[in-house]
Image (cartoon, coloured by chain):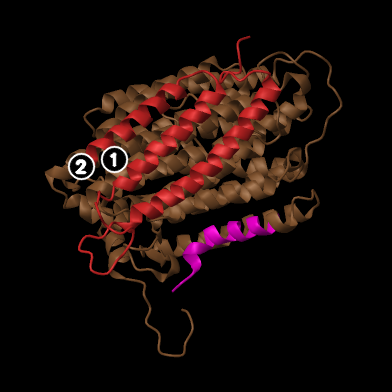
């Protein structure tokens, strides 16, 4: 058996164990282990992307138990893409953190690795209960990371985050229980078969379970009316943590996409297209509310947190259009919004350091010490996130609107997305002019920006430009991903038929 | 048997929801515990109820209970336990830092 698919889980786990045993003493050792492990994730993710890009579905049978009895990890195009995105974002966030933010509280690197373990695991797993377990791992790490640095505002935000997510976990378990009671399996590939063959007698339990799961994923993805926890939490989180959290809402979106494609697809018997009628209205309302939030923000980090909600809403409404081309455009949008969203959180922190007491509020304050660097980074980030040419946000929005053109509810999508886009541009220009131009007092000596910090920030923000240059390759990949998701037979066959049990000749060890 | 369990899960969940809607951290911790119990029993019965059967396997028995929900419940209990411990510590920290056990951080 090829052990590559489990590496994105094993690397952070081993690094985390090492950090737990020999780290935590505040020396440089923590940083070395953390950065090494995070750098190592990148080639692994790229290798997986290369194999998955050929259309092959890799299946890893934990403990060599055959499906559907054991737990499987599955790498298809979607998983590999998400793993790559996570590896890139994590590396940039960690490089930013090692310039000092990691020393603000204990055990930062351990928690960071656990967070990566949970996120990677959630992208890899092919089992519903296992998805719950990885969600819990990423959540408990995120609680502690949210609190990293301490302080009153963070305590309050963390408390809300923890209580809401604990309730969410309970609902998740009830949903899992209902689905298990109806089908007798939790393996996603097996569920795809069993749900499609389910009789009307199990329809009630199945639908209840499915909608409860959608509720939980909507909570993670911060959709209205379950997303009001996000802006207060993300706007006070420590910068590298907030940057990494840019992918957390996308984990919820990923789970919706995965279950929508695999379990509750159009052929799923009594539970056919269970999620689809909810996604479009949920997404539209979320976009509207997030746009108001963006306009009402009086400081940059709060604005960015609302932008995260806006991107989750846009993704949800795109998935609600329910066609392979919609999924393809959603994935392209996801890549751009995650990288730029993460980068903007780092940039906001750089700006806050430079402006002293004013932080990122939109008030008159001293000039920033390096207006050229920060200003141009902000300009690039704002263009990338608002979806203006020449950066990748523009084709992302263009694909979305092209898909919506053919949909019966297209006029709603058009008006909401375009008006919200205009208002976001207005809010971002207000933010930029308030921070960089409305300056009064004389300039304080520069606090100095570490080159690593600006490099990490720039690399994320320029990810949008890189996506634009590689737009042909990327859209080719996302379209192939959407096709693969629409027809789940390949996934189901790979998991169920290749039973993983390797019969070895006598006298030989493990595979 | 079904009725008793259904009532048990229902009443526990209802009490948990009532406690969760209080504005202070201590009732919320209790509410989450209760909700955890209700969920665990629900998960346990999701494999179907068997009466007069061995907990796992016994030779000669016709109907065997489903072992998977037991494993799921065990995992859920462990995770729930860890989460509760974390929440209690966090609630104490919040009480210390904010000087109030209100979930909204107290009135201004």
The count of marks equals 2
* The N terminus of chain A: image quadrant: bottom left
Picture layout, residue B54 above or below residue A236: below
Residue A499, numbered circle: none
Residue A284, visible in the rendered structure: yes
Q: Residue furthest top?
A: B108
Query: Could you tell me how far apart the alpha carbons at marks 2 and 1 are, in whole angstroms?
Result: 8 Å
Any idea which chain is the red one in this picture? B
Q: Which mark is residue A271?
A: 2
Of pointers 2 and 1, the one earlier in the residue sequence:
1
Q: Is residue A8 magenta?
A: yes
User: Residue under circle 1?
Assistant: A210
Q: Residue A323's image quarter?
A: top left
Q: Where's residue A20, x and y in %?
A: 69, 54
Furthest toward the left, the residue is: A200
**Nearer to the camera, A436 or A347:** A347
Q: Secondary structure at mark 1?
A: helix
Say whether marks 2 and 1 touch (CB < 8 Å).
yes
Q: Quadrant of residue A125?
A: bottom left
Q: Is residue A376 left or right of residue A310?
A: right
Relative horizontal placement of residue B36, taking residue A444 as reference (left or right): left
Disc 2, SS? helix
Chain part drawn in magenta: A1-19
State the image coordinates of residue A36 (x, y, percent, origin top left). 68, 59
Q: Colour of chain A?
A: brown
Depth check: A193 or A323 in front? A193
Task: Identify the subunit bearing mark 2.
Answer: A
* Magenta residues, dominant SS class: helix
């Amino acid at each position: 058996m090829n052990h590559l698919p489990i590496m994105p889980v094993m690397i952070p786990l081993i690094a985390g164990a090492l950090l737990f045993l020999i780290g935590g003493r505040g020396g440089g050792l923590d940083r070395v282990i953390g950065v090494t492990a995070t750098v190592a994730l990148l080639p692994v993710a790229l290798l997986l992307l290369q194999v998955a890009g050929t259309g092959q579905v890799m299946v890893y049978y934990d403990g060599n138990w055959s499906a559907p009895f054991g737990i499987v990890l599955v790498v298809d195009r979607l998983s590999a893409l998400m793993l790559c995105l996570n590896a890139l974002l994590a590396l940039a966030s960690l490089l930013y953190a090692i310039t000092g933010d990691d020393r603000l509280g204990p055990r930062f690197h351990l928690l960071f690795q656990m967070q990566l373990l949970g996120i990677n695991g959630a992208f890899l797993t092919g089992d519903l209960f296992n998805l719950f377990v990885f969600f819990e791992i990423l959540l408990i790490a995120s609680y502690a990371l949210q609190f990293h640095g301490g302080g009153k505002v963070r305590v309050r935000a963390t408390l809300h985050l923890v209580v809401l997510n604990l309730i969410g976990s309970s609902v998740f378990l009830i949903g899992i229980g209902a689905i298990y009671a109806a089908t007798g399996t939790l393996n996603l590939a097996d569920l795809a078969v069993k749900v499609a063959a389910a009789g009307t007698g199990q329809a009630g339990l199945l639908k209840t379970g499915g909608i409860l799961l959608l509720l939980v994923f909507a909570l993670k993805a911060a959709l209205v009316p379950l997303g009001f926890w996000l802006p207060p939490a993300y706007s006070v989180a420590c910068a590298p943590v907030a940057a990494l959290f840019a992918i957390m809402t996308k984990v919820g979106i990923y789970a919706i996409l995965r279950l929508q494609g695999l379990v509750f697809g159009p052929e799923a018997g009594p539970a056919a297209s269970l999620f689809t009628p909810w996604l479009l209205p949920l997404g539209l309302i979320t976009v509207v509310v997030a746009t108001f939030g963006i306009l009402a923000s009086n400081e940059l980090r709060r604005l960015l947190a609302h932008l995260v909600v806006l991107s989750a809403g846009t993704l949800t409404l795109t998935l609600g259009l329910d066609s392979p081309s919609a999924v393809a455009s959603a994935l392209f949008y996801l890549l751009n919004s995650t990288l730029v969203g993460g980068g903007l959180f780092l940039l906001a922190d750089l700006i806050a350091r430079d402006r002293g007491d004013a932080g990122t509020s939109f008030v008159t304050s001293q000039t920033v010490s390096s207006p050229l660097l920060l200003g141009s980074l902000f300009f690039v980030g704002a263009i990338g996130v608002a979806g203006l040419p020449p950066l990748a946000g523009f084709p992302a929005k263009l694909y979305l609107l092209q898909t919506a053109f053919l949909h019966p509810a297209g006029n709603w999508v058009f008006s909401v997305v375009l008006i919200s886009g205009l208002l976001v541009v207005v809010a971002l220009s207000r933010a930029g002019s308030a921070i960089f131009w409305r300056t009064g007092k004389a300039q304080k000596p520069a606090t100095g920006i570490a080159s690593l910090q600006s490099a990490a920030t720039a690399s994320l923000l320029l990810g949008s430009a890189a996506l634009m240059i590689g737009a042909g390759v990327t859209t080719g990949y996302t379209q192939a991903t959407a096709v693969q998701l629409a027809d789940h037979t390949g996934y189901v066959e790979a998991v169920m038929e290749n039973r993983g049990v390797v019969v070895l000749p006598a006298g030989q060890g493990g595979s | 048997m079904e009725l008793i369990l259904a009532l048990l899960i229902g009443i526990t969940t209802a009490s948990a929801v009532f406690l969760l809607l209080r504005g202070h951290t201590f009732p919320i911790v209790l509410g989450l515990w209760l909700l955890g119990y209700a969920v665990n029993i629900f998960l346990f019965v999701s494999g179907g109820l068997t009466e007069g059967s061995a907990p796992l396997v016994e030779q000669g028995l016709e109907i065997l209970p489903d072992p998977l929900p037991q494993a799921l419940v065990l995992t859920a209990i462990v995770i729930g336990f860890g989460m509760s411990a974390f929440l209690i510590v966090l609630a104490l920290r919040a009480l210390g830092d904010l000087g109030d056990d209100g979930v909204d951080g107290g009135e201004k």
